[in-house]
Image: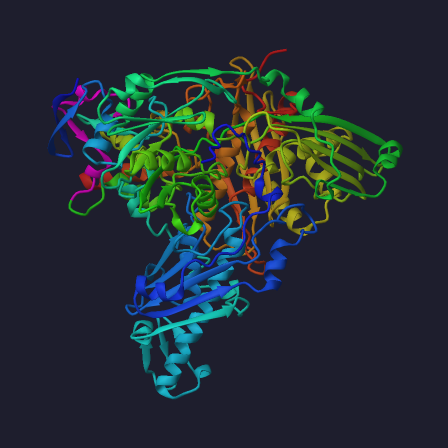
């Protein structure tokens, strides 16, 4: 049955009428209208739907909306601040790390999640962390490069 | 309406087999000014001679015979100086939006930021048969260049007239026309102001040669890059229309099943839900996807299924069911092949197989359909907007002019989005419900109800003289297709034949089409011959190869890779392969490791040299080439569709293995820029030599020759 669920997405509060078991992905896209988060498989296998829940990267197609209630959710739309791209977004832009770009939101959100817990990832860490994100266009080398660049930018920013 | 859900239409490389299209010129000129405001418009229509060139059988290949008779482009320069250029091609990640904007900017002498490309909209853009076959760079870029050159000439003439000087003394550059003698200048915006001037040109005006390009040839980032990193870009599944409802389609339990009973009483009792049956098609519309899904679940149906063949029988079936033909397009022969096979010093025959594989574009097929006053508009990610328009017009018995198909920049296709399926389904449901309807296929639907790269069996007979030169080559492809079927090697006696076989699974285009299958067979076979003669694979190829462009890529790749100076260590192997198709040339070297204990086969290094004439955007090209290498690695090592009795058994990312980060090797792509050669497309050929290079490297490491793709779907098997 549909319940009233309170969500906090990108710092804004939303009340949505949803079945609590509905995946967060559908609520974000169809109820709230944040379509930057993509459907790729609905099975947690491709990572296109990755968002941050309480700072941790999660596959929003696998998270029932009730589990996201009252926790801060960040989507790709929430990264840009006052017209300034997040360093990970900027690094993807600089590296041209996308072709069709359908995987890009998920790649960026996963990478933001990685850098929050591991600010200086080794190449193997990046590869390991992004193993669950599919890029079908084969842009992996540039994505790895972009994550490395973003780590550097964030480090410089922090200094 | 005639409902085609059950027809398994043959689409193997349809543009190679099927006539497509007549010319359409839908947009009246006056509409341009209504839509874009006053200014200058230039239309180009290719002359008969160019159209002939495009459609004549190429001396090398069987293909390109069915391209449209006229190729056109148009362009508008507004009163604000903004340039809008139109093409029926679509952006699916291959970077044409940027590459074409660059081309226009280069020829018109304006900054790339001032050029807007309108793509893939049947109401606005010139007719186009579809975005496939690596044709955009080869055919559309030159047309846009020509309209741009003509527009520039018009602007120069307008300036000359206003200054009362001759136009040949003036210079166009920086979005303005300058008179060097006086230093005065007029901006394009000023020259276009107040005009509603249009001109049609024969599209053979001279254009800027590649050596003098300034904007083209540069590594310019994607023009709409920021929209992708912010999530702002709207793919078809992201769009919505006022009052829009959501749809789900009921899929039969197996291919070719027919609906024998249908009971929608339970769904009918549900509020806000509509279930539609039309022949074997059943779909539901509701305010949410979930409600539509529930409506289908509540609908009782039964299906009649029929037994169908499985993977295990596939290659026997292909061999036994070839359709006899006398079509000269499918068979080429020169010299005395049979005689030469019998008389030469060395003989080697072998068979090769390729399994069905899936495109698996990350954006699944989707469409939004909207009917207003008997007219239909559909937004959908397709490579063939005009063909989808025609299919819709046919299915709903309405005029083509009553259908508009719009293609938002799409989340990839790789040859997999040629058909109309989601557009038809959404349109059928939207008509029934009288509101806009969105349909997004699930991943399982995408893996099951789209179409596949065809499987194939390839049989090769060959003979080599005592001098190590090819004496005879007899090459037969069953079912997978003709792309790249002809050998680039020098061989006097050769026969090449494509054998059509009735479809087993619905099949169609794929990046490089059959180019991967044919290159895999040929380049594996070449390797095997070289080995049997104790010749280095590189030396053996060069001995039989005179094409200078192919020799050049082979040489570049081999040098950068460090061929041959490497010793095979236990479990480590090196392989190479090369080829050409669609006017571009590729050579790939692979280094692999077979870990016998774990069974892992890892590609550790790929080096590829690629040459496609003058490079328009080296950054975009590098993305395409590296992307093709990684995509090719999946098809080489492990991708395969498994099927039994009309059911796909691995329709999920968890069971259909695609290349992921851990699979990606160290990659080097060498892009050879030939400014003296017209640009060819680059979306396909870079994939073709990857699989044989990897297979040859596995042989080098293990001494085991693997003749089927995928090479090691379950890793290295002992014994």
A2 over B667 or under it: above or below: above
Return the residue found at the far bottom: B164
- The one of B295 and B530 positioned closer to us in this rendering: B295
**Quadrant placement of the C terminus of chain A:** top left
- The answer to whether any part of residue B157 appears in the image is yes
Residue at the spot x=70%, y=41% of the render?
A: B486
- The one of B20 and B210 positioned closer to us in this rendering: B20
Q: Left or right: B159 with respect to B132?
A: left
Quadrant in the rendering for residue A91: top left
Return the residue found at the far top: B719
**Quadrant placement of the N terminus of chain A:** top left
Q: Position of residue B395 (x, y in %)?
A: 45, 39
Residue at the spot x=67%, y=34% of the render?
A: B523
Magenta residues, as a range? A58-81
Number of numbered discs visible in the structure rendering: 0
Quadrant in the rendering for residue A143: top left
- The one of A111 and B259 positioned closer to us in this rendering: B259
Q: Position of residue A77 (x, y in %)?
A: 21, 38
Q: Position of residue B565 (x, y in %)?
A: 63, 35
Q: Left or right: B385 with respect to B525?
A: left
Query: Can residue A72 be found in the magenta stretch?
Result: yes
- The one of B683 and A141 positioned closer to us in this rendering: B683
Q: Left or right: B118 with respect to B242?
A: right
Query: Can residue B673 be found in the magenta stretch?
Result: no
Q: Position of residue B35 (x, y in %)?
A: 31, 61
Residue at the spot x=34%, y=21% of the render?
A: A43
The way the protein has been coloured in the rendering is rainbow
- The answer to whether any part of residue A159 appears in the image is no
Quadrant in the rendering for residue B715: top right
């Amino acid at each position: 049955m549909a319940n009233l669920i309170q969500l906090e997405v990108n710092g804004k509060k939303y009340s949505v009428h949803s079945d609590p078991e509905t995946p967060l992905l559908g609520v974000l896209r169809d109820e709230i209208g944040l379509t930057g988060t993509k459907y790729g498989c609905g099975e947690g296998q491709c990572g296109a739907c990755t968002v941050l829940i309480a700072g941790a990267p999660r596959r929003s197609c696998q998270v029932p909306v009730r589990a996201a209630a009252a926790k801060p959710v960040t989507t790709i739309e929430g990264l840009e601040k006052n017209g300034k791209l997040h360093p990970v977004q900027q690094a993807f832009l600089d590296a041209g790390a996308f072709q069709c770009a359908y995987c890009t939101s998920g790649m960026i959100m996963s990478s933001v999640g990685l850098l929050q817990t591991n600010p200086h990832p080794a190449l193997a860490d990046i590869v390991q962390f992004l193993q669950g994100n599919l890029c079908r266009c084969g842009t992996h080398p540039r994505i790895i490069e972009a994550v490395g660049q973003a780590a550097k930018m964030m480090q410089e920013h922090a200094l | 309406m005639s409902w085609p859900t059950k027809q398994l239409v043959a689409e193997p490389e349809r543009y190679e087999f099927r006539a497509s299209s007549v010319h359409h010129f839908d947009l009246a000129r006056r509409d341009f000014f209504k839509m874009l405001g006053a200014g200058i418009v230039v239309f180009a229509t290719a002359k008969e001679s160019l159209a002939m060139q495009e459609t004549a059988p190429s001396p090398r290949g069987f293909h390109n015979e069915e391209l449209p008779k006229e190729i056109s482009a148009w362009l508008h320069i507004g009163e604000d100086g903004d340039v809008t250029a139109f093409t029926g091609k679509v952006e699916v990640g291959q970077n044409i939006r940027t590459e074409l904007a660059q081309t226009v900017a280069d020829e018109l002498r304006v900054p790339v930021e001032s050029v807007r490309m309108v793509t893939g909209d049947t109401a606005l853009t010139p007719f186009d048969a579809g975005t496939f076959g690596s044709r955009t760079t080869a055919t559309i870029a030159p047309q846009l260049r020509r309209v741009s050159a003509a527009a520039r000439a018009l602007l120069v003439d307008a300036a000359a007239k206003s200054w009362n000087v001759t136009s040949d003394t003036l210079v166009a550059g920086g979005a303005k026309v300058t008179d060097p003698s006086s230093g005065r200048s007029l901006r394009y915006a000023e020259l276009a102001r107040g005009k509603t001037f249009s001109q049609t040109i024969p599209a053979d005006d001279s254009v800027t040669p590649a050596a003098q390009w300034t904007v083209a040839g540069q590594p310019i980032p994607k023009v709409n890059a920021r929209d992708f990193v912010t999530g702002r870009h709207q793919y078809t599944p992201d769009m919505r229309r006022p009052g829009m409802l959501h749809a789900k389609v009921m899929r039969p339990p197996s291919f070719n099943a027919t609906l024998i009973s249908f009971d929608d009483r339970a769904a009918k009792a549900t509020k806000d839900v509509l279930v539609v049956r039309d022949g074997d098609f059943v779909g539901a519309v509701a305010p949410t996807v979930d409600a539509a899904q529930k409506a289908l679940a509540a609908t009782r149906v039964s299906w009649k299924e029929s037994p169908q063949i499985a993977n295990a029988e596939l290659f026997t079936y292909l061999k036994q069911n070839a359709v006899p033909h006398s079509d000269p397009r499918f068979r080429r022969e020169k010299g005395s092949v049979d005689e030469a096979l019998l008389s030469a010093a060395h003989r080697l025959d072998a068979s090769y197989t390729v399994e069905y594989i899936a495109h698996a574009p990350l954006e699944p097929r989707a469409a939004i359909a909207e009917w207003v006053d008997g007219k239909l508009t559909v937004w959908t990610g397709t490579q063939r907007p005009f063909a989808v328009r025609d299919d819709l017009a046919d299915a709903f018995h309405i005029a083509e002019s009553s259908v508009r198909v719009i293609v938002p920049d799409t989340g990839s296709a790789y040859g997999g989005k040629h058909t109309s399926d989601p557009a038809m389904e959404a349109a059928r449901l939207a008509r029934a419900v009288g509101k806009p309807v969105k349909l997004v296929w699930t991943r399982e639907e995408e893996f099951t109800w789209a179409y596949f790269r065809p499987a194939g069996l390839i049989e090769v007979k060959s003979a080599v003289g005592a001098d190590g030169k090819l004496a005879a080559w007899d090459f037969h492809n069953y079912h997978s297709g003709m792309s790249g079927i002809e050998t680039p090697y020098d061989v006097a006696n050769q026969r090449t034949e494509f054998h059509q076989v009735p479809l087993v699974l619905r099949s169609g285009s794929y990046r490089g089409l059959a180019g991967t299958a044919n290159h895999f067979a040929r380049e594996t076979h070449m390797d095997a011959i070289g080995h049997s003669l104790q010749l280095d694979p590189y030396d053996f190829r060069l001995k039989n190869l005179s094409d200078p462009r192919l020799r050049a890529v082979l040489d570049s790749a081999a040098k950068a890779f460090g061929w041959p100076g490497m010793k095979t260590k236990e479990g480590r192997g090196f392989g190479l392969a090369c080829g050409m198709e669609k006017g571009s040339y590729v050579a790939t070297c692979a280094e692999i490791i077979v870990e016998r204990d774990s069974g892992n086969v890892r590609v550790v290094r790929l080096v590829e040299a690629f040459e496609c004439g003058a490079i328009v955007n080296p950054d975009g090209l590098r993305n395409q080439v590296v992307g093709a290498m990684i995509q090719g690695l999946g098809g080489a090592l492990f991708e395969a569709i498994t099927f039994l009795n009309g059911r796909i058994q691995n329709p999920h990312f968890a069971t259909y293995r695609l290349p992921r980060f851990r699979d990606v090797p160290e990659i080097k792509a060498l892009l050879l820029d030939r400014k003296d050669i017209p640009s060819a497309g680059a979306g396909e050929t870079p994939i073709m030599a990857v699989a044989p290079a990897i297979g040859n490297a596995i042989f080098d490491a293990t001494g085991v020759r693997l003749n089927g793709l995928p090479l090691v779907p379950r890793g290295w098997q002992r014994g």
